[in-house]
């Protein structure tokens, strides 16, 4: 009977800190990785598409053209 209790305690997350800390570490790594990849994917989909055509006065160009 004592062996059954010990076997049950070894599988419990509250009593076995080695397995629980490993699980929590991998859970944190997965969450951070998912958050970063999700942010990168969203930024990629909402990226700035194309440059707008801006009218520049001919007198303010690098080589100005005067009338």
Image (cartoon, helix red, strand yellow):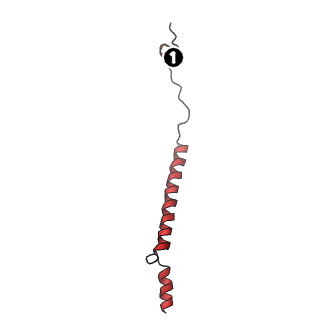
Q: Tag 1's secondary structure?
A: loop
Q: Residue at x 47, y 76 (%)?
A: 16
Depth order, front residue of 62/19? 19
In the image, residue 1 sits, relative to residue 41, either above or below, namely: below
Vertically, is 66 above or below 14? above
Spot the residue most to the left.
14
Percent across and percent down for residue 22 are 50, 68
> Could you classify mark 1 by the number of other residues whose Cα lies within 10 Å: few (under 14), some (14-19), or many (20 or more)?
few
- The residue depicted at 49 percent of the width and 54 percent of the height is 35
In the picture, residue 15 is in which quadrant?
bottom left
Q: Residue furthest bottom?
A: 1
The residue sitting at 47% across, 78% down in the picture is: 12
Q: Position of residue 10 (x, y in %)?
A: 49, 81
Q: How many marks?
A: 1
Q: Position of residue 11 (x, y in %)?
A: 50, 79
User: What residue do we see at 49% from left, 19% from top?
Assistant: 56
Judging by the rendered image, the residue that carries numbered circle 1 is 62
Q: Residue 59 in the image: state x and y as whole percent.
A: 48, 13
Looking at the image, which residue sits at the far front?
Answer: 18
């Amino acid at each position: 009977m004592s062996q059954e209790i010990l076997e049950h305690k070894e599988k419990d997350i509250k009593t076995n800190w080695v397995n629980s800390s490993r699980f929590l570490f991998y859970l944190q790594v997965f969450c951070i990785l998912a958050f970063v990849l999700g942010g990168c994917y969203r930024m990629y989909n909402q990226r700035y598409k194309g440059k707008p055509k801006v009218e520049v006065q001919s007198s303010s160009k690098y080589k100005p053209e005067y009338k």
